[in-house]
Amino acid sequence: MSGSGISELDRPRVSAAAAEKAIAHLLRELGNDQVIGPEADNLEDYGHDEGEDGWYTPACATLCESAAEVTAVLAIAREHAIPVTPRGAGSGLCGGSSPIAGGIVLSTERMTRILEISTDDLVAVVEPGVVTGTLAAEADACGLFYPPDPASLAFCSIGGNAATNAGGPRAFKYGVTREYILGLKVALTGGDLLTLGRRTSKGVTGYDLVACFVGSEGTLGVTTELCIKLLPKPAQVSTILSVFAGVDSAAAAVHNLLRTGFRPRAIELADKNALDHTRATSRFRFPQNAGAIVLLELDGEPEGLEATTLRAGQMCEANGAIDVLVAQSAAESQQLWQARRNISPSLKRAHRHKIAEDICVPRGAIPEMLRRIDGIRARHNLDIATFGHAGDGNLHVNLLVDEDRRDPVVGARIEAALTEVMTETIHLSGTLSGEHGIGLAKQRFLHLEQGPEVIAWQRRLKRFWDPDNLLNPGKIFPARARCHE
């Protein structure tokens, strides 16, 4: 099945003979247990991610267990001129790990070792297949804190988080993944291995190549090890749920909270449509009269946190909240957050298609963006649910479709609505993606945000690191007449 907007001319062409030779070489190097060949039933599992951008069949998938094996796969791929699609847990939503060029899927899912957690240096050294939630739990057990918390933290991997520069609710106070990657070991096309960055909290030696690779979506290299910054664990955390009649009043409350100096570590907003989908599957059920909710999480020292929590709740009430609930225990807080994290999977279970976008607008533009989304919903007769990280303006706009999106009329409605969402985002000085990346899904909109000169220079950077265009070809940048420049 084909994804959106990708011409066959934009992909390296892999002959059956070349693929066969490459697979035979990989089998000699790695063995049968680590190469999933074309005859395997589970090869299709490596042909897509969690988004809606098509299924593609690679020639094979390799399950690497070490940096040496990653470099070996990349050397073999270059020798046989076979494209490689790096893959972590496959939890992305933009087709970033979909092997649109066929070739080899290089999976790091077996590279799951936490090599070190240092309470003295406040760092962890991990392999890319470590699940983000596992790293957070291990750090917590040592009295430390890893802040980034994407909604999929229970199964997404830290290598994939670095590839997309993932965020999450706590990004408002603590920042996104890039702020926590001190160093990387990266395998390049052809098999060279580079050690980038540092272990120290500060460092300005040469160009910041770590920042270049974080967020590059597997188009420049394959991460084999990460040095992660950790923080001291906050002494106490409190959670507040405020219920509003609608998203306008909820967004206004968020604006006023932040304008008066509150600094929660998370500020989540969800509209009525998003909330209604969670009622059947969550232990905590949002109130029936909720037209929108704001979920706040604060942290700090116990003696000051109680007063701050009280003032935050009072300010929500003063700004139109019809109900305010403060979690009285860690278990209650967990229920609230589980209900919030359940929104996206609930939407996906309830509808045939869930087209998820993660636009980001300046905080002050949130109310206007929500109004414009309402207009898009009405103009195109589409069901849309919106939720997200209101503290930093990162809104997840979900188009919910029960018709067959392959129908030309339905597909045209979806495309028109998506184009309007992206265009309105840019008109409000926003950005196309706050944390999911561009991948395959958004490359046709990249020109709305970036001029041709900027895109051209990024293509040159890609060509410098990957001159044969073998690493995750056809991603991020709009399709061209040819993939080799």
Image (cartoon, rainbow, N blue to C red):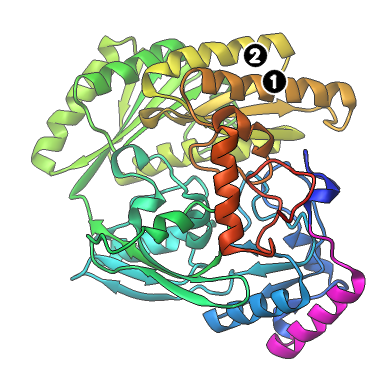
Residue on which the image places disc 1: 417
- Give the mark, 1 or 2, whose residue is nearer the N terminus: 2
Q: Nearer the viewer, residue 214 or 157?
A: 214
Residue 298 sits in quarter: top left
Residue 339 numbered mark, or none:
none
* Residue corresponding to mark 2: 376
Per the rendered image, the range of residues in magenta is 12-32
Instruction: Say which residue appears at 68% left-offset and 61% top-offset.
Output: 469
Q: Is residue 123 left or right of residue 342?
A: left
**Residue 30 lies in the magenta stretch:** yes
Which of the 4 image quadrants contains residue 119?
bottom left
Q: Residue furthest bottom?
A: 28
Marks 1/2 in contact by CB < 8 Å: the verdict is yes
- The residue positioned 42% from the left and 27% from the top of the image is 393
In this rendering, the answer to whether 131 lies above or below 303 is below
Q: Main secondary structure of the magenta part?
A: helix
Q: Residues within 10 Å of mark 1 (few under 14, many from 20)?
A: many
Helix, strand or loop at mark 2: helix
Secondary structure at numbered mark 1: helix
Q: Amino acid at mark 2?
A: Ile
Position of 451 relative to 59 (above/below):
above
Residue 154 in view of the camera: no
